[in-house]
Image (cartoon, helix red, strand yellow):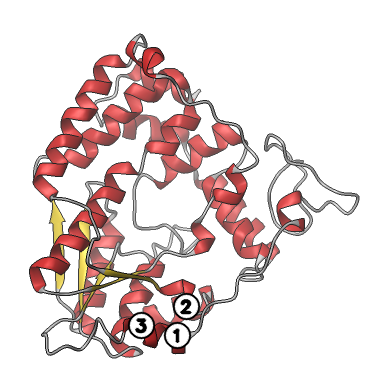
């Protein structure tokens, strides 16, 4: 049986992790509690950017997942703003995320703007990134898998704000998704330009640059210049139970087959989870659960239970087929996965 930190759930399989005599890892020992800035400060920070006689006064980027759905509810019902929900249709949206977006925006009477590409540019970028980084291992692949989605969400949100004359963007990301403290333990070599140019994935490097150029032209710039950005959970307490109970009342749901309510919005999650484990000895979701347990936002036993359920439901053959369907050769897929 794999030994895990006695306080969070990080396993001994992680490079450079160590435990003290009580079985506590160094991330738990170095942890400093985060204190939100408070709703009063949030209201002060947005007062000059909202309610200026416009029909809409803020943009809330939404994925159909848990935390962004709550951010939309909070903007409408607590802050009493008139938001526009903006979604980047990134080619990897899950069926339940699509349904959630439809149901919650209807329930809240909020317009939903969907921005994407009919030419599946995001999928092509992810596939070419996978192929160009395959010679350098799982760590580099997983580090850059979400690049297109990040650009797409930012661009869609910022440009919709400008189009509608809105100055405020409210994001629903949280520190519990951050892997920065974990990655501070790891050493990661980035290939030089010359190594890339002489690697087997060099042709995919140029294809990736071509598709990303197309995305920039189609989506527009992702500059936030002139806009006020708020990260909601820097101001209010993040509470998983309250969030889920609240958004379920406006039509949000998770699939019955999912062990966790987190990250149900993207079909790339199993890939990111698997490659993170392959590269670092721990899955991306385990890192997130550890953040939640460490901060007192999740019970350790619940985290272990969800980890077991996720692992038992995972099928690497399904992941292999998923990647092959993205036009990645079986040889490259198997080299990376096995």
Could you say where residue 199 lies in the image, as x and y percent from the top left?
37, 11
Q: Is residue 105 above or below residue 162?
A: below
Q: Nearer the viewer, mark 1 or mark 2?
A: 1
Residue at the disc numbered 2:
235
Instruction: Tell me which residue sits at (26%, 76%) in the image.
Output: 104
Q: Nearer the viewer, residue 161 or 245?
A: 161
- List x then y, in percent, for residue 1: 77, 41
Q: Position of residue 300 (x, y in %)?
A: 69, 63
Q: Report the residue at 91% width, 50% height from top.
A: 21
Which one is nearer the viewer's eye here, 73 or 245?
A: 73
**For marks 1 and 2 on the same chain, the one whose residue lies earlier in the sequence:** 1
Q: Is residue 314 shown to the viewer in this render? A: yes
Q: Specify which label sits upstream in the sequence, 1 or 3.
A: 1
Disc 1 to disc 2: CB gap under 8 Å: yes
Circle 1 sits on which residue?
Answer: 41
Q: Indicate the quadrant where residue 215 lies.
A: top left
Q: Secondary structure at mark 1?
A: helix
Q: On the rendered structure, is 215 left or right of 71?
A: left
Q: Earlier in the sequence, mark 2 or mark 3?
A: 3
Q: Is residue 117 visible?
A: no
Q: Nearer the viewer, mark 1 or mark 3?
A: 1
Residue at disc 3, secondary structure: helix
Q: Classify residue 147 as left or right of residue 307.
A: left
For the residue pair 61 and 269, the one nearer the viewer reads as 61
Distance from the alpha carbon under mark 1 to that under mark 3: 15 Å
C-alpha separation, residue under disc 2 versus residue under disc 3: 12 Å
Residue 253: percent from left, percent from top: 36, 70
Q: Tell me where residue 228 sits by quadrant.
A: bottom left
Residue 333 shown left or right of residue 125 in the figure: right
Q: Residue at label 3? A: 74
Residue at the extreme top of the image, as rendered: 198
Where 160 falls versus 18 (above or below)? Answer: below
């Amino acid at each position: 049986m794999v030994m895990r930190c006695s306080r969070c759930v990080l396993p001994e399989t992680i490079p450079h992790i160590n435990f003290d005599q009580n079985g506590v890892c160094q991330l738990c020992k170095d942890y400093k509690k985060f204190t939100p800035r408070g709703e009063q400060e949030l209201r002060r920070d947005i007062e000059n950017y909202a309610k200026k006689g416009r029909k809409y006064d803020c943009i809330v980027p939404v994925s159909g997942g848990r935390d962004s759905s709550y951010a939309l509810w909070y903007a409408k019902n607590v802050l009493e703003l008139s938001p526009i929900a903006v979604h980047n249709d990134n080619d990897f949206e899950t069926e339940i995320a699509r349904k959630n977006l439809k149901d919650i925006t209807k329930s809240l009477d909020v317009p939903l703007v969907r921005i994407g590409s009919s030419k599946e540019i995001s999928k092509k970028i992810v596939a070419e990134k996978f192929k160009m980084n395959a010679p350098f291992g799982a760590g580099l692949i997983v580090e850059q898998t979400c690049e297109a989605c990040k650009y797409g969400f930012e661009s869609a949100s910022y440009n919709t704000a400008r189009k509608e004359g809105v100055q405020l963007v409210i994001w629903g990301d949280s520190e519990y998704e951050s892997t920065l403290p974990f990655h501070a333990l790891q050493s990661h070599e980035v290939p030089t330009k010359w190594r890339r140019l002489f690697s087997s994935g060099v042709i995919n490097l140029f294809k990736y640059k071509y598709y990303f150029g197309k995305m920039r032209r189609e989506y527009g710039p992702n500059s936030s210049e002139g806009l006020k950005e708020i990260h909601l959970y820097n101001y209010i307490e993040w509470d998983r139970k309250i969030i889920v109970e609240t958004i379920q009342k406006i039509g949000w749901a998770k699939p019955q087959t999912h062990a966790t309510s987190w990250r149900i919005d993207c079909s790339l999650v199993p890939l990111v989870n698997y490659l993170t484990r392959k590269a670092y000895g721990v899955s991306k979701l385990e890192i997130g659960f550890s953040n939640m347990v460490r901060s007192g936002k999740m019970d350790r036993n619940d985290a272990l239970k969800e980890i077991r359920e996720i692992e038992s439901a995972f099928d690497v053959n399904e992941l292999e087929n998923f990647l092959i369907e993205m036009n990645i050769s079986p040889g490259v897929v198997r080299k990376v996965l096995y």
